């Protein structure tokens, strides 16, 4: 941890940073809104929107929440939590994407290969 | 050095000014205490009551299974009983018992701290535990639930039983667990005594620290999941409801994302205890300090990547199953490392076969078999046969009861002198240990065979060919219960009439033994300065007359 | 040797190639486990004795591991664990990949019975008939909660998910009758949700299936598809009994007056029953029919709302037949009191 | 400076060596708590991910039937409130408690604006029948997964709304204490922690906005 006076010095430059981050956040907000109106095809819209959100989130965490100045443990805690967010999302979606297609809910839009689709399904459960 | 010890070090002395009678002894002083030791003791009492309750449910279950058809109850009562057994044992006993009980008492002392970082949060954690237990008990009395502790949807969302209070109780208990974990991590980071570098931290603390990481990262997911089930049951919000396009398997993913690491919440503290006990009773430094310490962290981390091995038969994709299966193999390695290191610690030691050590022997046996059957289950194809049979029941009881309860009992005996200032009767202790270990084997080894032969779990009645093994298992359970009652009786008697222990009856070199028994309110009479790893025995002459004199290496 | 270990481990018969392969892996794992455990315990016991405390002044040396220890501690178990995975996982993948020519059988779990439907329409309750020596793919689903199809002799288990299909497959070696269990907890009747796997010689199976398809005769354990039956008015009671058995009514309603999950059918007709709300109804044809279609609407006091609706599952003639069957169930000395309490205590909803 | 140190020491609990260690502990504890908050939302985000994957077009269709401009406005409002909280903390480090109170008050006002828009939005959903699960009656988006979108919408925004209310309460309490001069350059940990909590609320909304309103 930095010495108390060193910390006070840090705070000097903070106001300017806060202004810059705020403006950047607003810019990114309108940017992501504008890009969403373009309806980027092929699922890239999601990627772009999430990339912008991650950038904004990064700015908030680093500067508003001072992770930029703080020592390892706090950063590690936050990064670890993000790793587990990614882990849970990725492996659950991967399951739905790769499982026996009929094991996904009826009406879902996961591509179903013809070879595994049985012909003439009997009555479906409600 | 406390004045009471100064007169004659060979006569054990009772530390007159201790946390039990200072600052006051009334009920109010306990109810509003911020002392981690008192909170730890309260957790120990509460979890022991929960253990007794869960054990009673288990006995009733075993009695019901004595004959193939209905024996002493009907199917609905049976379904409620096994649910309550699971909920009480896991949420009220297994998860809090060692971390919140022994951890609270010992972790700050081992680090040389005066208290945990956030004493108020610590007390809040205890009251959240009581509140959660009360809400869950309300649900049990008013209808109970018949879902099993796993709460699988859509059964749990359509059952007529009163499942919502039990879900909310578990949700509240989760907060208690999170607060305790948070406190331990911050304490370990910020309140270590001078000289307590990371490579001198006792192995107990390392394991509890790893446990805390899991508690913090996994518990919120379970809390949210249980809330979703409660919302679906109460208001038909339908997040997992197949009729509204929901996916019941997703619930299983969420549930096991917590509940598989939760297995490590239960077993890591047991490993914490064992690492201390094996050193103290073989009077040896741990063989491979770093290996044991880091393998705790490894278990905590890799344990998160294996939840899908509970879903091999549930329609999960082969792709996911492969990932989860292979990662499960890696998490088993960390446990293997610990087992080998504990065994190697005995080499050239000076082994005293006392009660805690007897439980260590039981622990080692159960962990090896429980762990190896776990790896066998993770091979995916064998799990297809064993999933949801008594094999799985036996496997996780080997880990949870076999290992964790053995460690709990080892801890109870090992630190009983520290917590109470008194000793228990050694002869009765060994009798109890033998009864518990034998009873446990007779209970659960037949269940492995039952699972092999195909008996599914949660069966109220069963075909006659499973009869003989079920009788054997019930007989074993009665021996186990008898052993546990024996332990309970002599422990209660010793609380009041046990001989005075002195500050370090085992002449252990764990840091917690450097303070008088019971410890003073601020844990140490003089703030300790740590100059070496715990459990170093080679640099001191083991002369009873010298102990518990201050070790030369402990500059005071 | 195989048979000896199988007996020691209480494993059931091996009905398929897969079962044998899985058991081989099982034996391999159990052997390595036993050897490893024996090694650890023998070492530990040797240490207990050799290094027991001889005096209270024992001095012990400081022993620390070398790199070779660490490598061995990690490497040896990891080798075996990964070997087990390498053997076991392909078997798992194999179970998920049915051969192209496999015969499809639809399996539907519902509280608390199994329904099997064959290509071309015939179906049966709780009895799965398959030909020996030919691959069979099971497409498994559920009508209500998650069940799990478990055939121990095949070392086969697959959950039945409501509203969607999971698959698995097997080739049974030889004719015989084997057990089917439900392995996923599904309520009061979980342990009574038993089925039979009947493996028939292939030609017999073909004949059986052809016969079923022609609808000329009914096997004792098979029922016709819903709405297919043409009922003769003269024999309504017998038809009712058959339909009631086939639809699983008798799993919850007794016909001998004993206590069960639902009210007994003996003397039910024209009995005065107290409902949950406290009002009294006379059980007549209308009430019986309504209770089949909307069981929760007028629930007899003390019973749980666990009965599924049979709306759409029973054709009108079938429902009528069941009512006639219930009417026929009378004891000579007619009792007029309310029905006995259920086999479990009632649970308040709140 | 000595007087200030003494003031700081009066806040140090008996088991901490000094104020700096206590502050480090408080920060680390807060970050750990924030990690649990992140994981609390994770289950919902993962459920969103899975169902969006399964019902891609239904979800896009449904997100076109909620008011994007409200989401956009609320994002701007919340980002700005986060900025004012950061400025408030800056003044707390300089011992200017009243300015801290002013900026925290501004943040609370912005939070009220946020909740106001949210209320307008919720009212609209109630009128249209865009409700979770069993209560879903909206005719324009139908088909598998349609009600799931709104279930998740209410779960995510509802849970976030609860966090906004909690955050407002904390900001109000800390703001009042700052106004009363309870904090100094040497001791302003509660201001910092309150700020961290509020930034997390903002951070989560930054991800909610595109997921619910844009894609």
Image: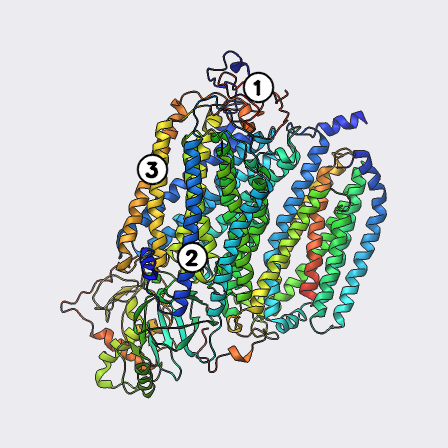
Please tell me the numbered disc located at residue D86: none
First in residue order: circle 3 vs circle 1: 3
Please identify the residue farthest to the left as the structure is shown: C332
Coordinates of residue B535 in the picture (x, y in percent) = 55, 30
Please tell me the numbered disc located at residue B435: 3
Please tell me the numbered disc located at residue C28: 2
Please state which of the two labelled residues, at mark 2 or mark 1, is closer to the viewer: 2
Q: Residues within 10 Å of mark 3 (few under 14, many from 20)?
A: many
Q: Helix, strand or loop at disc 1?
A: loop
| Along the line of sight, the residue nearer the viewer: C226 or C267 | C226
Task: Same chain for labels 3 and 1? Say yes or no.
Answer: yes
| Along the line of sight, the residue nearer the viewer: B154 or B311 | B311
Q: Seen in the image, is B229 located left or right of residue B498? A: right
Coordinates of residue D112 in the picture (x, y in percent) = 71, 53
Q: Seen in the image, is B218 located left or right of residue B49? A: right
Q: Seen in the image, is B137 located left or right of residue D129? A: left
Above or below residue A58? Residue B482 is above
Quadrant of the rendered structure where residue C50 is?
Answer: top left
Coordinates of residue D176 in the picture (x, y in percent) = 72, 40
Task: Same chain for labels 2 and 1? Say yes or no.
Answer: no
Please tell me the numbered disc located at residue B550: 1
Chain to which mark 2 belongs: C
The quarter of the rendered structure image containing the N terminus of chain C is: bottom left
Please state which of the two labelled residues, at mark 3 or mark 2, is closer to the viewer: 2
CB atoms at circles 3 and 1 under 8 Å apart?
no
Q: Residue at 55%, 24% (x, y): give it.
A: B514
> What is the CA distance from the residue labelled 3 to the residue labelled 2?
32 Å
Q: Residues within 10 Å of mark 2 (few under 14, many from 20)?
A: few
């Amino acid at each position: 941890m930095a010495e108390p006076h060193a910390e006070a010095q840090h705070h000097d430059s903070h106001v300017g940073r806060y202004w810059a981050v705020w403006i950047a956040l607003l810019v990114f907000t309108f940017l992501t809104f504008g890009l969403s109106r373009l309806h980027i095809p092929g699922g890239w819209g999601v990627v772009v929107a999430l990339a912008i959100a991650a950038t904004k989130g990064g700015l908030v965490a680093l500067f508003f929440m001072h992770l930029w100045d703080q020592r390892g443990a706090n950063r590690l805690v936050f990064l670890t939590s993000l790793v587990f967010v990614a882990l849970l999302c990725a492996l659950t979606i991967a399951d739905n994407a790769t499982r026996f297609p009929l094991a996904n809910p009826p009406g879902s839009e996961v591509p179903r290969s013809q070879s595994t689709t049985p012909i003439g399904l009997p009555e479906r459960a409600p | 050095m406390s004045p009471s010890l100064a007169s004659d070090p060979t006569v054990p002395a009772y530390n007159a000014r201790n946390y039990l009678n200072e600052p006051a002894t009334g009920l109010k002083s306990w109810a509003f205490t911020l002392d981690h030791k008192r909170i730890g003791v309260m957790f120990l009492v509460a979890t022991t009551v929960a253990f007794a309750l869960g054990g009673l449910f288990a006995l009733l279950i075993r009695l019901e299974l004595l004959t193939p058809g209905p024996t002493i109850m009907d199917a609905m009562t049976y379904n409620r009983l096994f649910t309550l057994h699971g909920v009480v044992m896991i949420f009220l006993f297994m998860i809090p018992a060692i971390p919140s009980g022994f951890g609270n008492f010992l972790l700050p002392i081992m680090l040389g701290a005066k208290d945990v970082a956030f004493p108020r949060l610590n007390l809040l954690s205890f009251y959240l535990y009581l509140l959660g237990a009360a809400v869950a008990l309300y649900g049990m009395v008013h209808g109970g639930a018949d879902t099993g502790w796993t709460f699988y949807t859509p059964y749990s969302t359509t059952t007529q039983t009163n499942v919502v209070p039990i879900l909310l109780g578990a949700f509240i208990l989760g907060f208690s667990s999170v607060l305790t974990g948070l406190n331990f991590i911050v304490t370990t980071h910020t309140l270590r005594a001078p000289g307590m570098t990371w490579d001198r931290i006792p192995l107990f603390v390392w394991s509890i620290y790893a446990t805390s990481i899991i508690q913090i990262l996994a518990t919120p997911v379970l809390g949210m999941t249980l809330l979703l089930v409660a919302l679906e049951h109460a208001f038909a919000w339908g997040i997992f409801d197949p009729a509204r396009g929901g996916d019941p398997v997703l619930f299983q993913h969420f549930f096991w994302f917590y509940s598989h690491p939760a297995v490590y919440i239960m077993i890591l503290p047991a490993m914490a205890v064992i690492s201390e006990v094996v050193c103290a009773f073989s009077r040896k430094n741990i063989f491979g300090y770093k290996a044991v310490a880091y393998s705790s962290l490894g278990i905590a981390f890799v344990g998160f990547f294996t939840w899908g091995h509970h879903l091999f038969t549930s329609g999960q994709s082969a792709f996911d199953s492969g990932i989860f299966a292979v990662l499960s193999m890696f998490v088993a390695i960390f446990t293997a490392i610990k087992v080998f290191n504990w065994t190697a610690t005995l080499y050239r030691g000076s082994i005293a076969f006392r009660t805690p050590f007897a439980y260590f022997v039981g622990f080692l046996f159960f962990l090896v078999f429980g762990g190896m059957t776990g790896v066998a289950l993770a091979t995916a194809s064998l799990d297809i046969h064993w999933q949801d049979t008594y094999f799985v029941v036996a496997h996780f009881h080997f880990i949870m009861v076999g290992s964790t309860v053995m460690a709990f009992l080892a801890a109870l005996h090992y630190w009983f002198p520290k917590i109470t200032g008194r000793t228990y009767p050694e002869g009765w202790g060994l009798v109890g240990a033998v009864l518990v270990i034998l009873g446990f084997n007779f209970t659960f080894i037949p269940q492995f065979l039952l699972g092999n032969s195909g008996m599914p779990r949660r069966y109220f009645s069963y075909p006659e060919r499973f009869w003989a093994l079920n009788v054997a298992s019930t007989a074993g359970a009665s021996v186990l219960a008898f052993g546990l009652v024996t332990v309970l009786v002599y422990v209660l008697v010793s609380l009041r009439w046990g001989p005075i222990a002195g500050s370090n009856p085992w002449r252990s070199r764990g840091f917690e033994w450097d303070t008088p028994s019971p410890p003073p309110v601020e844990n140490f009479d003089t703030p300790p300065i740590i100059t070496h790893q715990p459990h170093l025995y080679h640099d001191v002459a083991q002369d009873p007359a010298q102990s518990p004199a201050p070790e030369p290496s402990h500059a005071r | 040797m195989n048979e000896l270990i199988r007996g020691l481990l209480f494993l059931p018969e091996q009905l398929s190639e897969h079962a044998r392969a899985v058991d081989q892996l099982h034996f391999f794992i159990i052997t390595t486990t036993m050897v490893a455990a024996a090694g650890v315990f023998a070492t530990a016991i040797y240490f207990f004795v050799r290094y027991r405390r001889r005096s209270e002044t024992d001095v012990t040396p400081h022993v620390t591991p070398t790199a070779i220890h660490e490598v061995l501690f990690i490497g040896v178990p990891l080798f075996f664990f990964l070997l087990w995975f390498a053997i076991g996982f392909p078997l798992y993948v194999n179970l998920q990949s049915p051969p192209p020519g496999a015969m499809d059988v639809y399996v539907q779990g519902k509280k608390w019975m199994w329904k099997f439907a064959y290509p071309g329409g015939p179906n049966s309750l709780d009895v799965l008939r398959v030909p020996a020596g030919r691959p069979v793919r099971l497409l498994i689903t559920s009508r209500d909660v998650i069940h799990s199809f478990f055939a121990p002799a095949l070392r086969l288990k697959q959950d039945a998910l409501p509203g969607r299909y999971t698959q698995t497959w097997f080739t049974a070696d030889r004719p015989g009758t084997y057990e089917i269990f439900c392995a996923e907890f599904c309520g009061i009747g979980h342990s009574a949700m038993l089925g039979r796997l009947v493996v028939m010689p292939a030609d017999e199976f073909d004949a059986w299936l052809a016969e079923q398809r022609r609808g000329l005769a009914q096997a004792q354990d098979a029922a016709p598809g819903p709405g297919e039956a043409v009922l003769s008015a003269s024999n309504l009671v017998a038809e009712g009994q058959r339909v009631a058995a086939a639809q699983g009514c008798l799993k919850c309603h007794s016909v001998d007056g004993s206590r069960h999950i639902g009210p007994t059918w003996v003397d039910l007709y024209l009995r005065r029953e107290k409902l949950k709300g406290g009002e009294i109804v006379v059980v007549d044809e209308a009430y019986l029919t309504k209770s089949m279609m909307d069981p929760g609407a007028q629930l007899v006091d003390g019973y749980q709302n666990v009965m599924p609706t049979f709306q759409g599952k029973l054709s009108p003639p079938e429902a009528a037949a069941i009512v006639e069957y219930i009417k026929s169930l009378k004891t000579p000395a007619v009792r007029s009191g309310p029905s006995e309490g259920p086999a479990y205590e009632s649970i308040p909803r709140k | 400076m000595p007087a200030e140190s003494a003031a700081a020491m009066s806040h140090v609990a008996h088991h901490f060596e000094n104020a700096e260690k206590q502050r480090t502990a408080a920060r680390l504890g807060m970050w750990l708590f924030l990690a649990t908050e992140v994981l609390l939302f994770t289950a919902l985000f993962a459920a969103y991910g899975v169902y969006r994957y399964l019902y891609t077009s239904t979800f896009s269709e449904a997100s076109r039937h909620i008011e994007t401009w409200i989401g956009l406005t609320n994002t701007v409002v919340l980002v700005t409130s986060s900025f004012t909280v950061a400025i408030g903390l800056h003044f707390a480090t300089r011992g200017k408690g009243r300015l801290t109170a002013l900026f925290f008050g501004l943040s609370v006002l912005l939070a009220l604006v946020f909740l106001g828009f949210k209320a307008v939005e919720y009212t609209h959903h109630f009128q249209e029948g865009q409700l979770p699960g069993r209560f879903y009656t909206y005719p324009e988006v139908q088909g598998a997964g349609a009600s799931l979108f709104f279930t998740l919408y209410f779960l995510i925004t509802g849970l976030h709304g609860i966090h906004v209310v909690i955050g407002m309460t904390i900001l109000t309490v800390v703001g009042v204490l700052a106004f009363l001069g309870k904090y100094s350059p040497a001791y302003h940990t509660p201001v910092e922690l309150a700020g961290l909590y509020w930034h997390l609320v903002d951070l989560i909304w930054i991800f909610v906005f595109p997921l619910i309103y844009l894609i």
